Amino acid sequence: MVNQKHWLIILSQPPYASARVLAGLDAAMAAGVFGQRVSVLLRGTAVFQLQQGQHNHPTDRHVAKTLASMPLYDVESIYIDTTYWQQVNAIPDLDVMPIAPNRVGDLIARADHVLSF
Amino acid sequence: MAMHTLNALPDSDACIASLTALDVLIIMDAAVYLLSEARDWSALPCQVYVLAEDIDAAGLTAPTSIKIINYAAWVALSTEHQQHVAWY
């Protein structure tokens, strides 16, 4: 596709921490829908966005389910920081790729645009 | 070839872990207090800068390996790097 760029969306906050969480997920889905190559990195405590059994406030979107829908928006690459990953009881229906914090630089280098939320 | 901007202390470890030799790091805002820690800044893989206005406001001094820059130099660095990564 002409004008297709590789976008790296970096999410740094746990679910429901602030409006930045959903803003970042929206940015990823919007870029995917518009035919962009999108990678999402969940770093630090943002890996808990994939935790099972989240009980969100009725006015909030469910963060784990939103992430699980990413393949429908052609967001195929979800990277997860290994720092807290062992503590996460993650939703089973999403393929993720572990990445150590000292490999994040390689991920950034392969992206055309980096957005941090 | 990324320009990293670090605005706050909590993300400093993750930011520094992600640096590569082709990157630059600009420390600003509340992250300038990182410079008060005993750390070998010359051991980082890339050049580190700090915004003059922010380090002056904090009353801190920069180690010799860190370059103090103004806003114009920040803009110049942003034109020289493909990606901007904000740690805030």
Image (spheres, rainbow, N blue to C red):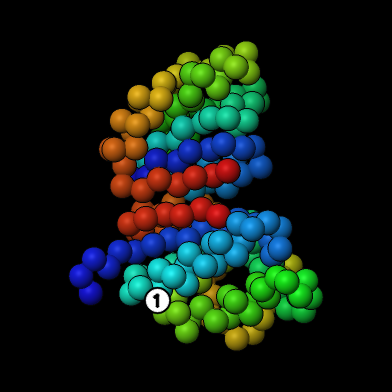
Residue B21 visible, this angle: no
Give the residue pinned by disc 1: A33
Residue A25 or B46: which is nearer the viewer? A25
Asked where in the image residue A49 lies, by quadrant, the reply is bottom right
Q: Amino acid at mark 1?
A: Val
Q: Secondary structure at mark 1?
A: helix
* Vertical position of residue B35 compared to residue A14: above or below: above
Which chain is indicated by disc 1? A
Look at 60% across and 65% down and name the residue there: A22
Which residue is drawn at the image coordinates 40% and 36% (left, top)? B24
The vertical placement of A83 against A59, above or below, is above
Q: Position of residue A71 (x, y in %)?
A: 48, 82
Taking the spot 56% from the left edge, 61% from the top edge, the residue there is A23
> Which quarter shows the N terminus of chain B?
top left
> Which image quarter is the C terminus of chain B in?
top right
Task: Using the image, determine if residue A81 lies above or below residue A62.
Answer: above
Question: Which one is nearer the viewer's eye here, B28 or B40?
Answer: B28
Residue at image coords 58%, 30%: B29
Report crowding for label 1: few under 14, some 14 to 19, many 20 or more residues within 10 A (C-alpha).
some
Residue furthest toward the front? Answer: A59
Q: Position of residue A62 (x, y in %)?
A: 68, 75
